[in-house]
Image (cartoon, helix red, strand yellow):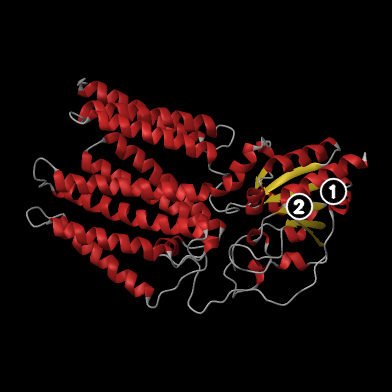
Amino acid sequence: MLEISSNIENIFYLLSASLFIIGLKRLASPATARNGNRLASVGMLIAIIITILKYTNTNFEWIIIGFFIGGILGLVLSRYVQMTAMPQLVAVFNAFGGGASALVAIYQLMYSREPITGTFTLASIAFATVIGSLTFTGSFIAFGKLQGIVSTRPILLPLRNYLNLILLIAIIVFAIILSIPNISSINFLYILIGLSLIVGLLIVIPIGGADMPVVVALLNSYSGIAGAGAGFVLNNPVLIISGSLVGASGLILTRIMTKAMNRSLANVMLGGIGVADGSTQSGSDENRPVKSLNTEDAAMILGYAESVIFVPGYGLAVAQAQHQINELANLLKDKGTNVKYAIHPVAGRMPGHMNVLLAEANVPYDELKDLDEINSEFDRTDVAVVVGANDVTNPTARTDSSSPIYGMPILNVDKAKSVIVLKRSMASGFAGVENELFFLEKTNMLFGDAKDSIEGMTREIRDLD
C-alpha cells in the first residue's frame, strides 16, 4: 500500500478544498456553472484518492468496485434522467448524502478498534447521526411528494407541534447522554437513530407541494451539515470543509427561497411551512368563462408586439419546450421585438429549475431576469407569455388571506397590456389554488401541449413575413 506523508496529504487536501470553493463560486452564474461543477468534481476526486491512500489498509478492491459502480450510476443518471425529474433526483441525492454521513458516524462508534472516550468525538457522532438520519427520511418524503407518491397537500397530524417538541427534547437528551464518556451505550445510539428517522418524516409531511423548493434547499443544507459532522468524527479536514460549504450555501439558498415565498425560516425548520390549522384552499368548482385563442391568433398578437416577456414554469419542463421557446424568442428578436424572461425564484420544483432549463437551450443569460428586476417592467410590456407557470403568477397571493400562497411575492403578469397563457387545461397549480389571472379580460388561454403550441406560433409568425 502506498504511504503518503502528512505534509503531502495536507497540501492535496488544501488543493481539494480550494477547488470546492472556486467551483461553488462559479456555480453562482449559469455562464460559469458547468466549469464550476467540473472543478468541484476534480477536487472531490483528489480528496477521495488521498483519503483512500491514507486510511485504507485492507479491502482496497471493494473501494475500487464501489468507485466504478458509483461512477457508472452517475453517468447513467446524468444522461437519462429528464429535466422534469431533476428535483426528485436532488432529493434522493440529499437522502443518500445524509444517510452516508450517519452511517460513517454509527460505524465509527460501533466498530472502532479502540473505545472512543473523547467527549467531542462522541458529540460529533451524535450530531452526525441525528442530522444525517432525519435528512435521510425527510428527503425521501420530499421525493415522494415531488413524484406524486405522497400527497402534495399538507398532511397535518393532530398536536404535531407538541409531538415535534417532545421528540426534539428527547433527541437532545439522548444525544447528551451519548456524548458522556463511560456512560454512553450502543442502546442510546439505536434510540437516537430511531427518533431522528421519525423526526425526518414529521418535519416534511406537513409541508405542501408548493413549498417543496424550500424543502429541497433546506435538506441539501442538512446533508452538508451532516457531512461536516462526519468530518469531525473522522478528523478529516476536507470533509469538514466540504460539508460546511454545502451546509452554508444550502442555508443561504433556503433564506433566498423563504424570502421569495414570504415564509419564515423558523417555520421552515420546524416544518409545516405556511400551514395553519383550519386554513383553507382557494378555488372553486364553478365553471367560469375564459377567453381562448388558437396559435394563429396568438402569433398575430406576438408578431406585432414591441416587447414580450416569457414567464416559464414547470409546464415548460414537462413539455420539454425550452428549445422551442428560444427559437420563438429569436424569431421575435429578428423582427425587432424586445424579449426577456421573467424567472421566479421558486418557479418549477427546485431552486434554479428554470435557469438550468433555459441554459440547456442556450438562452442568453442577460435575458433572464429575476423577480425584483422584472416586476416593474410588466406594466410597460405589450405581451406576457406564461408557459406552464401557475402559482407564481396568481394575483390571489396579494388579496386572499385564506389562500396558502397569500403573501408570496409573485410576478406581476396581470399588469402587462396583454397576457397569453399556455396550459394543457384549467387545472390548478402545485398549491391547489385556482389562478385568478386566467379569468382577467386581458388574458387569453392557449390550450394544448406547450411544445406544439410554441411550434405553431413560430410557424405562423414566419408566415406573417
* Left or right of residue 240, residue 349 in this image: right
Horizontal and vertical percent position of residue 2: 21, 20
| Earlier-in-chain disc, 1 versus 2 | 1
Which quarter of the rendering shows the N terminus? top left
* Left or right of residue 123, residue 347 in this image: right
Q: Residues within 10 Å of mark 2 (few under 14, many from 20)?
A: many
Horizontal and vertical percent position of residue 193: 25, 58
Which of the 4 quarters of the picture holds residue 408?
A: bottom right
Residue, far bottom: 278
Which quarter of the rendering shows the C terminus? top right
* Pointer 1 with pointer 2, Cβ within 8 A: yes
Identify residue type, mark 2.
Val
Identify residue type, mark 1.
Leu
Secondary element type, mark 1 = helix
Horizontal and vertical percent position of residue 29: 56, 37
State whether residue 258 appears in this view: no
Q: Which residue is mark 1?
A: 302
* Left or right of residue 165, residue 363 in this image: right
Q: Residue at x 68, y 43 (%)?
A: 322
Secondary element type, mark 2 = strand
Label number found at residue 385: 2
Q: CA distance from mark 1 to mark 2?
A: 9 Å
Residue, far left: 182
